[in-house]
Image (spheres, rainbow, N blue to C red):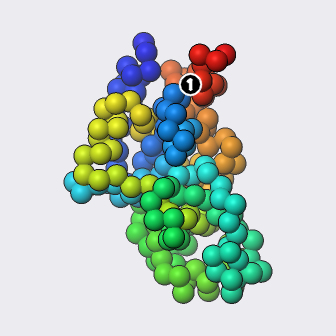
Amino acid sequence: MDILDLRRSTNIKPAAGKLLIAEPFLTDPGFARTVVLLCEHGDDGSIGFVLNRPSSSSISDLLPELNNVSLPIFEGGPVRNDTLHLIHKMPELMGGAEVLPGVFWGGSYAHLAYVLEHHEPDAAMLRLFIGYSGWDKGQLEAELEEGAWLVADSFNDLIFGTESGRVWQDSIRSLGSAFAFLANMPLHPQLN
């Protein structure tokens, strides 16, 4: 069974709360070895955030008034890198839309500032992203048909508790033993 047959065997369809796992041979520098949490998927397109690409920016670079807060920031994707987005587990403090049980996308920046100043959340409760990953109508479906992505169920530990360097491998392994060998494939096997 080749990789394309394996991909087709998962039968998981893209939807809010699902993961897009870059195929092992996807060499697009914007998405190679990335995992995207889909937060919106519909007839008009899709929006998500890359979970495993830490940014060199700090919270004080983006919100100077919060210079005493230490929280990692991730590059959510190549679209609108001048925007800040939130994935969190604090709907009572931040609001937002539930993308999977207990995980929310969005919230106001006033609420974010309040939470950062008064509750000191850590990466197990809140993820910040600069920019996002977006697909126009039919674009993600075309990429799936080309074999660029695997679709998987998401889980809280992966979003909030996995070291970014392991997110891609752990996501691949979550698909089951038939996929486990992919987690150890080099990016360019022909150079092996």
- Vertical relation: 108 (above or below) 14: below
Image point (56%, 64%), residue name: 129
Between 88 and 148, the residue placed more toward the observer is 148
Q: Is residue 1 visible?
A: yes
Q: Secondary structure at mark 1?
A: helix
Q: Position of residue 10 (x, y in %)?
A: 39, 30
Q: Position of residue 16 (x, y in %)?
A: 37, 54
Q: Is disc 1 surrounded by few (<14), some (14 to 19) or many (20+) residues within 10 Å?
A: some
- Residue type highlighted by circle 1: Leu
Image point (51%, 43%), residue name: 31
Image point (64%, 64%), residue name: 73
Image point (33%, 44%), residue name: 140
- Vertical relation: 4 (above or below) 99: above
Q: Position of residue 87 (x, y in %)?
A: 52, 65
Q: Is residue 157 visible?
A: no
Query: Horizontally, is 131 left or right of 69 in the view?
Result: left
Query: Horizontally, is 126 left or right of 41 in the view?
Result: right
Residue wearing tag 1:
182
- Vertical relation: 137 (above or below) 87: above
Specify the quadrant that holds the C terminus.
top right
Between 192 and 88, the residue placed more toward the observer is 192
Q: Position of residue 145 (x, y in %)?
A: 31, 32
